[in-house]
Image: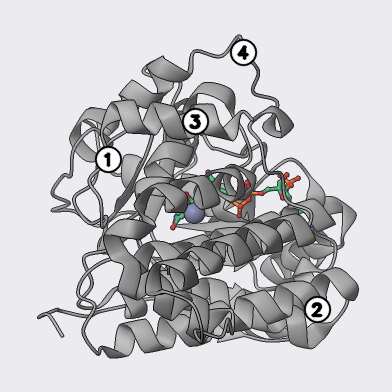
């Protein structure tokens, strides 16, 4: 194992009824002015809004609503939220939603306590937080990003056409409430997209050095198998509590830093998808589903032993009679087949990206990370995008 430091400051409350049971006492110590942030209104249709506001008002809180956080949250929305928080002298932010709401809230919590140029100082490059962001609590309504248990916030700067994330431990939510039943109302496409995002996070961590025996990789294999099995179960039975609860905790486990310990991590596929998102506003998990098999066909020969292990240990592909390279490739094709099986898109066209989109400009804007088995060039990223059009 490589050296590491581990800390995770988020306290998690998991399970059926956890919001009803714990929300009031969790907000007790933060003052009375609560900024309730949410997205486009799903929480009003599924009853979550009623449950949350009832708990807050009966606990004597004054609720200031900040709705309309869009998927792929923008820097403009962050600034609007920070202004709102300052004007209303907010004591604590409560984000109710998925990755978009949680990420936007983390950035608001920081921007509300900072008077400088937030983008330049914290997102354009890693910054130093020598002040306390506004306290934040989250209630997760769609599983996938794992944002509830880290300080990561992925924000789109529309003017610069850059979508980028930074993980500041000071932005970790103080508490996270995870009720798997809250995810029952998520439409199937979004549920599968979130599940695939979780699988992608685990793969991006797994396919990177070190490759010698290490506990992070072993946990990653167990998590991948759990995501695959429970995504199948959740597609078959949308109200299967066992499946939904496993998927919800898989998502947190993938991004609570535990399986990253001692690993370089790759995340090149995320870099590519984020820039596709910055230019086209495509769905995050769906973008990853299109890119992953094509990206892995480009890199697996540079990490044959690990891809072979993935095929055998995660997909149960027998190694007998095949060369290591053939087994490794079979694992990548099993992943591609799974993506089709769960109804995810397999081409960029299916994401609404056509020939009018300048793929070269997007490819050139992608960051190239050091952790991949094969260092990408912008030319190869463009090749990957072009292959994803077919
Ligand atoms: O906006 P509403 O009306 O609430 O509808 C949302 C939205 O349309 C809907 N939804 C959420 N909960 C629901 C529900 N619909 C019915 N019932 C419910 N219970 O789902 C849609 C998508 O929500 P969103 O939050 O955008 O999805 P997701 O959780 O996939 O988040 C995606 C964002 O997170 C970023 C992505 O890049 C993207 O911007 N990521 C954040 C990460 C992090 N902070 O660690 C890591 C990830 O790699 C990712 O980049
Ligand atoms: Zn992701």
Decide: is 100 above or below 169.
above
Furthest-front residue in this view: 321
Q: Earlier in the sequence, mark 3 or mark 4?
A: 4
Which mark, by number, is residue 222? none
On the image, the x and y values in percent for residue 287 come to 58, 42
Q: Earlier in the sequence, mark 2 or mark 3?
A: 2
- Element under disc 1: loop
Please identify the residue farthest to the top as the structure is shown. 356
- Location of residue 177 (image quadrant): bottom right
Quick check: 35 above or below 147? Answer: above
> Pointer 1: what residue?
376
From the image, state whether disc 2 or disc 1 is nearer to you. 1
Q: Which residue is mark 3?
A: 385
Extreme residue in the left direction? 3
Q: Is mark 2 within 8 Å of ligand 1?
A: no
Q: CA distance from mark 3 to mark 4?
A: 11 Å
In percent of width and height, residue 79 lies at 42, 30
Q: Which residue is tagged 2?
A: 233
Mark 1 to mark 3: distance in Å? Answer: 13 Å
Q: Is residue 381 left or right of residue 115?
A: right
Specify the label residue 355 is tagged with.
4
Which one is nearer the viewer's eye here, 355 or 264?
Answer: 355
377 lies left or right of 196: left
Q: Position of residue 254 (x, y in %)?
A: 45, 73
Q: Give the residue drawn at x 64%, y 53%.
A: 63
Residue 128, horizontal then vertical, whole percent: 13, 49
Q: Residues within 10 Å of mark 2 (few under 14, many from 20)?
A: some
Query: What is the distance, in whole Å, between disc 2 and disc 1 at their CAs?
Result: 36 Å
Q: Are marks 2 and 4 in contact (CB under 8 Å)?
A: no
Q: Callout 4: 10 Å neighbours few (<14), some, many (20+)?
A: few
Q: What quarter of the picture does the C terminus occupy?
A: top right
Whichever of callouts 1 and 3 sits on the residue coming sooner in the sequence is: 1
């Amino acid at each position: 194992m490589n050296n590491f430091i581990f800390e995770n400051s988020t306290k998690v409350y998991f399970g059926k009824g956890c919001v009803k049971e714990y929300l009031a006492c969790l907000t007790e110590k933060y003052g009375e002015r609560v900024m309730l942030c949410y997205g486009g209104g799903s929480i009003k249709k599924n009853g979550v809004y009623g449950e949350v506001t009832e708990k807050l008002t009966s606990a004597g809180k004054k609720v200031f609503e900040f709705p309309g956080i869009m998927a792929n949250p923008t820097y403009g929305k962050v600034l609007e939220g920070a202004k709102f928080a300052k004007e209303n002298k907010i004591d604590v932010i409560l984000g109710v939603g998925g990755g978009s709401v949680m990420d936007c809230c983390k950035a608001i919590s920081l921007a509300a306590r900072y008077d400088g140029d937030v983008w330049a100082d914290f997102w354009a490059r890693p910054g130093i937080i020598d002040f306390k962001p506004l306290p934040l609590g989250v209630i997760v309504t769609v599983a996938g990003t794992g944002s509830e248990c880290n300080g990561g916030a992925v924000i789109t700067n529309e003017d610069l056409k850059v979508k980028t994330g930074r993980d500041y431990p000071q932005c970790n939510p103080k508490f996270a409430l995870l009720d798997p039943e809250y995810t029952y109302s998520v439409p199937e496409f979004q549920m599968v997209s979130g599940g695939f995002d979780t699988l992608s996070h685990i793969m991006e961590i797994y396919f990177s050095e070190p490759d010698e025996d290490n506990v992070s990789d072993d946990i990653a294999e167990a998590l991948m198998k759990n995501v695959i099995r429970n995504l199948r179960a959740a597609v078959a039975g949308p109200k299967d509590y066992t499946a939904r609860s496993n998927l919800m905790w898989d998502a947190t486990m993938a991004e609570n830093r535990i399986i990253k310990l001692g690993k370089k991590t790759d995340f090149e596929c995320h870099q590519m998808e984020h820039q596709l998102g910055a230019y086209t506003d495509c769905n995050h998990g769906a973008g990853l589903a299109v890119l992953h098999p094509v990206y892995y066909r480009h890199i697996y020969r540079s990490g044959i032993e690990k891809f072979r292990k993935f095929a055998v240990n995660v997909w149960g592909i027998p190694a007998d009679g095949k060369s290591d390279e053939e087994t490794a490739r079979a694992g990548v094709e099993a992943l591609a087949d799974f993506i089709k099986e769960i109804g995810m898109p397999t081409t960029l066209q299916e994401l609404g990206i056509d020939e009018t989109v300048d793929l070269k400009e997007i490819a050139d804007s992608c960051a190239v990370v050091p952790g991949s088995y094969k260092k990408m060039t912008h030319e190869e990223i463009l090749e990957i995008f072009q292959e994803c059009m077919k």
